[in-house]
Image (tube, rainbow, N blue to C red):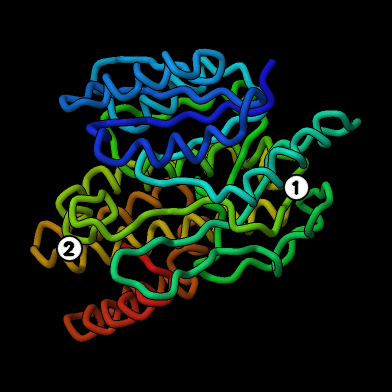
């Protein structure tokens, strides 16, 4: 068994995937890299096959019809043989020193009596045009270099949450919670780091800047204009997260810290959906915003109250054109600080 499986979903990634793969190869024989070629029409297949021929004991390539990012993750998870599982997008990369520290820690943890379900580390926004890159760290919220439970989790700041870039899961946990991301849908990374949480009992945090998250390309899915054009997919993921909280209410209810974290995360995602619909600005967009909140209310009134009258929910539902203008200005401030979109 490998120590760590890293899945790299690729779609037309030939121009930049080599930097990603080269950064991962430093892990050596302890890791397996699964390149999932998601129906690319460029030279992604050739690049992937070349790496397989050079590193047959480390790299595997799976070529499939296009099904979207979630489909690539699903395939990688199904084929994983590693004790732990990580997703690295093909335009991102990992930092060598932090990577080696993480692998050393995973080896130590693998030999211990208690395996963490989730290992968290920092990530860096490598934003185009920015001279100073923002680091997302969790040292004020999570104990460092020790196994801990939800009871020991402290307060997360608004905008400080665990993204796909931050997390390594125990592979068996993802299988046990039957994680299956929707295909042909953007923004499923929110589901990836949300749905396993009720099953996570033990965690471990390393305060190292491991993952380099490349952001700022005009064609990226998190570009604001593109997000508005794909708003129905954002709303689909948002509603799936609401449904998941409602369906797993009994499992979440008894864990106050878990409940608080998941509701805060859902509040942020719902606020982003609302702001994007406000930015869209058409009567159709505003009707979709109204329907989103009505849907939450119909499914769970207590959850609706928690989301609607929290800080972000309230600020994105101010009445009239003036209220919407204030909401957008507040969003701009948050975007500059947290690097949204």
- Name the residue furthest right: 113
Question: Residue at image x 17%, y 27%?
Answer: 42
**Residue denoted by label 2:** 286
Q: Percent from the top left, x then y, of residue 233?
A: 26, 43
* Crowd around label 2: few <14 · some 14–19 · many ≥20 (10 Å): some
**Residue denoted by label 1:** 204
Q: Nearer the viewer, residue 214 or 146?
A: 214
Q: Secondary structure at mark 2?
A: helix
Say if 169 sits above or below 261 in the image: above
Disc 2 or 1, which lies upstream in sequence? Answer: 1
Say if 122 sits above or below 30 in the image: below
Q: Is residue 123 visible?
A: yes
Cα separation between marks 2 and 1: 42 Å
Q: Is residue 172 visible?
A: no
Q: Nearer the viewer, residue 226 or 328?
A: 226
Which of the two discs, 2 and 1, sits closer to the camera?
Answer: 1
Q: Percent from the top left, x then y, of residue 312?
A: 43, 72
Question: Residue at image x 81%, y 58%?
Answer: 152
Q: Percent from the top left, x then y, of residue 83?
A: 69, 24
Location of residue 236 by image quarter? top left
Question: Residue at image x 71%, y 53%?
Answer: 206
Question: Residue at image x 68%, y 68%?
Answer: 155
């Amino acid at each position: 068994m490998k120590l760590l499986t890293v899945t790299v979903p690729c779609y037309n990634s030939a121009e930049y995937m080599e930097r990603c793969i080269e950064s991962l190869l430093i892990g050596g024989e302890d890791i397996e890299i699964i390149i999932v070629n998601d129906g690319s029409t460029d030279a992604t297949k050739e690049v992937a096959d070349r790496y397989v021929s050079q590193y047959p004991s480390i790299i595997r390539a799976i070529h499939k019809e296009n099904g979207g990012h979630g489909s690539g993750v699903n395939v990688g998870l199904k084929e994983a043989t590693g004790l732990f599982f990580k997703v690295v997008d093909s335009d991102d990369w990992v930092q060598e020193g932090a990577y080696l520290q993480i692998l050393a820690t995973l080896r130590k943890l693998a030999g211990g009596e208690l395996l963490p379900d989730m290992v968290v580390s920092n990530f860096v926004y490598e934003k185009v045009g920015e001279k100073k890159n923002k680091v997302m760290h969790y040292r004020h919220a999570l104990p460092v270099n020790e196994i801990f439970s939800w009871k020991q989790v402290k307060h997360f700041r608004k905008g400080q949450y665990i993204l796909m870039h931050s997390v390594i899961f125990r592979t068996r946990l993802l299988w046990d919670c039957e994680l299956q991301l929707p295909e042909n849908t953007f923004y499923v990374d929110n589901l990836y780091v949300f749905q396993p949480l009720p099953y996570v009992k033990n965690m471990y945090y390393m305060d190292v800047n491991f993952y380099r998250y490349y952001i700022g390309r005009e064609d990226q899915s998190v570009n604001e204009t593109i997000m508005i054009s794909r708003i129905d997919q954002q709303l689909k993921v948002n509603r799936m997260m609401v449904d998941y909280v409602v369906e797993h209410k009994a499992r979440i209810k008894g864990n106050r810290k878990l409940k608080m974290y998941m509701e805060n995360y859902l509040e942020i995602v719902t606020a982003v959906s609302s702001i994007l619909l406000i930015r869209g600005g058409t009567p159709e967009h505003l009707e979709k915003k109204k329907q989103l909140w009505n849907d939450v209310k119909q499914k769970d009134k207590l959850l609706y109250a928690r989301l609607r009258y929290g800080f972000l929910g309230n600020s994105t539902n101010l009445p009239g054109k003036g209220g919407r203008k204030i909401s957008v200005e507040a969003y701009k401030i948050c975007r500059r600080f947290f690097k949204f979109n």
